[in-house]
Every structure is written in C-alpha cells, then in structure tokens.
C-alpha cells in the first residue's frame, strides 16, 4: 500500500494523463471511426487531438500543482484578488453556460429532424452560432478578468494564475474550447459525417464545455463564506448560481452520454454502431454521469442534498426544453436518463445525511461507500426500468455481470476523482477572504444588472430560434 501511494505521488501527472488518453481513445472507439480513411491519416488526426489535451493538462499541472522554487516565491507581490472582478466574471460565464446548453439541445434536435449530413454542408447553422456565441461570451469574460489580474502587482505567469486561480482555470478552459472547436468542422471535411455522437471532436468539445462550467460554478461558490458540512437550508444567491451551472453541466453530460440509446428501435439498422457497443455500457454511463456531478457538487458545496437538487433541476430543464420545442413528438427525444438517476442520487444524499448526523462525513471512506450506495441503488431501481423503457440494451444474466462489475468499478473511480476535484476547486476559491466580499450595495446592483442581462439574452435567444430557417436537406 505504501509503495502504491509513493508511486501515485511521484507519477500523478503521468498517471492522470495516461488515464485520460485511454478513456478518450476507448470512448472514440465505441463512437466509431471512418472505414474509408487511410489509417495513417486517422492516426495523425488522433495523435494531434490527444497532444492538445495533454498540453492543456500540462498547463494545469504547471500553473497549479508544480512546486514553486523558493527564489520565485520571494518575488510574489500580487495584491489581494478582487471579489468584484470574480463576481462579474462568474456571472458572465454563467450566462455563457445558458447559451451553450440551449445551443446544444437545439443542435441535437435539428440533427434528428434534418439529418446528420446537413451540418457538413452548412456548418454555420443557427444552433452552432448560438453555441459559438456562448463560447465567445465565456472567453470574453475569462480573458478580460485575466487581463485585469495581469495589471496588478509583479510576478511570473504562475504567480498571477495562483493569485486568482479560478479565473485562471476558466481562462485555460476557454482556451481549450476555442482551440478544439474548429476541429469538429475540419474532422467532418476530412473524415465525413460522424458515425455517432462519440466522435473524438465531440468528446473534446464536451470535455471543454464541462471544464468551463465546473470553473464557472466554482467561481460562484468562491464568494460564499466558508462553513462546515450542512444541509440545504439558507442557500445564498451565489450557491444557487453554482448549483444552476452544475445542473447545466449535468444536462450536457446526459446529452453527450445517453441520448443515443434512448432513440433506438427495432426498425433501425442492426449494424448501427450503438448496437455494437457492450450491452453493459449504458447503465455504467448512467452511474458515471450521476456520480461525477453528484460527488463534485457535494465536496465543492459541502451541502447535503445538493446532488438531488441538481438532478431535479436538470430534469425540470429537460422537460421545459422538450415542451417548448415539442421534441418528444417531433424528434423522439426523451427524459428517461434524467428519471433513471434520480433515486440513486437521492440515495447518495441520504447516505451523506447519515454520515453528517453521525459526525463521520469528513472520513476518506465516505465517497467510497457513497459510490457503492449509488451503484447498488442504480442496480435495484434503474435496471428494471431500462428493461421496460429501452429497446437496447437487453439485460440478460451475462450482461448483468458486466453491469455489476464495471458499474461498481466506475462508481468507485468516479466518486473518488470527483470528490477530490470538488475539494480542490473549493480550495482554489479560498484565496478570497470572507471579509473581502463584494459590498452589499455593489453586489445588489450587479445582480440586478445580471438579471436584466439574462432576461435580454433569453429574449434574444427566443427570437433567434423562432426566426431560424431549417437547413435544406
């Protein structure tokens, strides 16, 4: 055990890089690769995309984890970060998350209605423009915040990132988003249309979007006075904004991870690639998605009940969007995945409530046992419903062995990683002392401006969608 701990401490960046690379390749494999493209061309494309991911992973390690030499530490003269700047950047990033989430939902709807191939000939269709607008808003606020930080004090680039770490993290995520976004149309031009939603450019897009939303939600929470574990009573506005952004992140994870299974029917071509994936995979994806957001939120907010609230909001948003767009009737879209995770997530919150009452919630064993609770609740509650609601997968006894084995494994791995991520994001936000919070009058004005901006943005989005002309197919 000591040897494994030592190896982890010495080689942590390399291990994480290897795991992320392996996961991307595995998901891309299940997403399917074009058959008529030369292997060397495909390999070069994959290598280039993976190098981009590893490069940004190295930047995160360099700016936040790598030790600062003693000589470099003495040169740090960055002044105290401004809570007002952080609040403005956080509100801008939250607005961007709304654009991105609505754009992705609309994009999926049009893909279902007008065909996947339409996007290759008309990549600049309106759902994509809405998505790009969200990316642009996020980049504008992130880079603007970093520009302000660069003007204050003296020190190296690492000093400045560590002086305002969450805005720095948002800037890195925005940069990753901007750099990887053009890969999708380029991939289409070289390799043709996507075989499934799990094409490698889509996986990179999803990774960038989730990173942005995690940084955005953490910025909101960084302005909340720190307290010990507690229940949901007395949520502040910043905590509510944090929870809302995490609900948008969960919505995106569902869209990338689960919707293809819910559209399958006996009339479809048996050679469709989703049918070729392991039949145990869908329940394991549900476990992974629900565990990732749940444990990140719990250990970021330290609010028991946050996971259930987030997935209730995710379900509510899905219902609103489907009703507004008539998506169930027009495009056979559903909210089955949202319902399938509700009881398992509630079980995790109930377990955390028990640990809080018992005074053991800070134990390292809490996320591990919580992951077991989530997985078992999924097995008991979700598996029978999957058999009733979905045509595929078919949960035979052999398939269930894979579901139990891989489900427990992914629940444990995801809960461990997500709880550490949530605690790390919480720690990054603790650089702003409680006494340096935004003055009440300024904060009230800022929130009124933010509310007005959100209303104006939603009105613009409504007009933008209502006046859109569908692509010619």
Image (spheres, grey):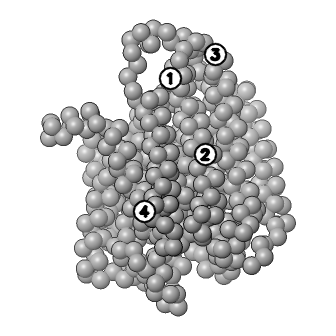
Residue 158: mark in rendering: 1
Give residue 70's position: percent from left, percent from top: 38, 11
Give the residue displayed 40% in from the left and 37% down from the top. 423
For the residues labelled 2 and 4, the Cα–Cα distance comes to 21 Å
For the residues labelled 4 and 1, the Cα–Cα distance comes to 33 Å
Q: Quadrant of the N terminus?
A: top left
User: Which is more foreground, mark 1 or mark 3?
Assistant: 1
Q: Earlier in the sequence, mark 1 or mark 3?
A: 3
User: Which is more foreground, mark 2 or mark 1?
Assistant: 2
| Residue 143 in sight in this render | yes
- Report if the CB atoms under discs 2 and 3 are less than 8 Å apart: no
For the residues labelled 2 and 1, the Cα–Cα distance comes to 21 Å
Give residue 419's position: percent from left, percent from top: 37, 44
Which residue is under mark 4?
27
- Report if the CB atoms under discs 1 and 3 are less than 8 Å apart: no
Give the residue displayed 20% in from the left and 34% down from the top. 6
Q: Earlier in the sequence, mark 3 or mark 4?
A: 4
């Amino acid at each position: 055990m000591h040897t494994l701990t030592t190896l982890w401490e010495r080689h942590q960046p390399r291990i994480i890089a290897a795991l992320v690379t392996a996961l991307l390749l595995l998901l891309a494999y299940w997403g399917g690769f074009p058959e008529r493209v030369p292997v060397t061309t495909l390999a070069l494309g994959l290598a280039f995309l993976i190098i981009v991911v590893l490069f940004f992973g190295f930047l995160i390690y360099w700016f936040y984890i790598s030790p600062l030499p003693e000589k470099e530490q003495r040169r740090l003269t960055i002044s105290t970060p401004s809570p007002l700047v952080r609040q403005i950047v956080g509100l801008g990033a939250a607005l961007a998350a709304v654009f991105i989430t609505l754009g992705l939902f609309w994009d999926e709807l049009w893909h279902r209605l007008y065909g996947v191939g339409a996007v290759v000939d008309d990549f600049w269709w309106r759902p994509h423009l809405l998505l790009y607008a969200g990316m642009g808003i996020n980049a504008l606020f992130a880079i603007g915040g970093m520009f302000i930080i660069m003007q204050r004090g003296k020190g190296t680039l690492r000093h400045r990132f560590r002086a305002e770490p969450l805005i720095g993290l948002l800037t890195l995520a925005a940069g990753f988003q901007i750099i990887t976004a053009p890969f999708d149309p380029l991939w289409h031009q070289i390799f043709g249309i996507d075989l499934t939603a799990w094409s490698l450019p889509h996986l990179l897009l999803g990774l960038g979007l989730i990173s942005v939303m995690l940084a955005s939600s953490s910025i909101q929470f960084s302005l909340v006075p720190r307290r010990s574990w507690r229940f949901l009573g007395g949520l502040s506005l910043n905590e509510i904004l944090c929870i809302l952004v995490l609900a948008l992140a969960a919505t995106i994870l569902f869209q990338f991870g689960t919707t293809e299974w819910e559209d399958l029917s006996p009339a479809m071509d048996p050679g469709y690639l989703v049918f070729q994936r392991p039949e145990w995979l869908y329940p394991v994806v549900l476990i992974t998605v629900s565990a990732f957001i749940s444990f990140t939120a719990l250990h970021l907010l330290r609010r028991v009940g946050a996971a259930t609230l987030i997935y209730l909001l995710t379900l509510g948003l899905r219902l609103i969007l489907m009703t507004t767009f008539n998506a169930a009737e027009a495009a056979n879209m559903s909210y089955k995945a949202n319902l399938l995770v509700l009881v398992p997530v509630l079980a995790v919150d109930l377990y955390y409530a028990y640990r809080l009452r018992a005074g053991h919630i800070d134990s390292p064993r809490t996320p591990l046992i919580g992951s077991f609770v989530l997985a078992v609740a999924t097995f008991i509650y979700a598996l029978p419903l999957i058999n009733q609601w979905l045509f595929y997968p078919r949960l035979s006894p052999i398939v269930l062995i894979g579901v139990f084995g891989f489900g427990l494994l992914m629940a444990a791995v995801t809960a461990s990683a997500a709880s550490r991520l949530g605690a790390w994001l919480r720690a990054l936000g603790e650089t702003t002392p409680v006494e340096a919070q935004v003055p009440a009058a300024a904060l009230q004005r800022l929130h009124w401006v933010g509310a007005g901006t959100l209303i104006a943005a939603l009105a613009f989005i409504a007009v933008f969608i209502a006046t859109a002309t569908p692509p010619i197919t």
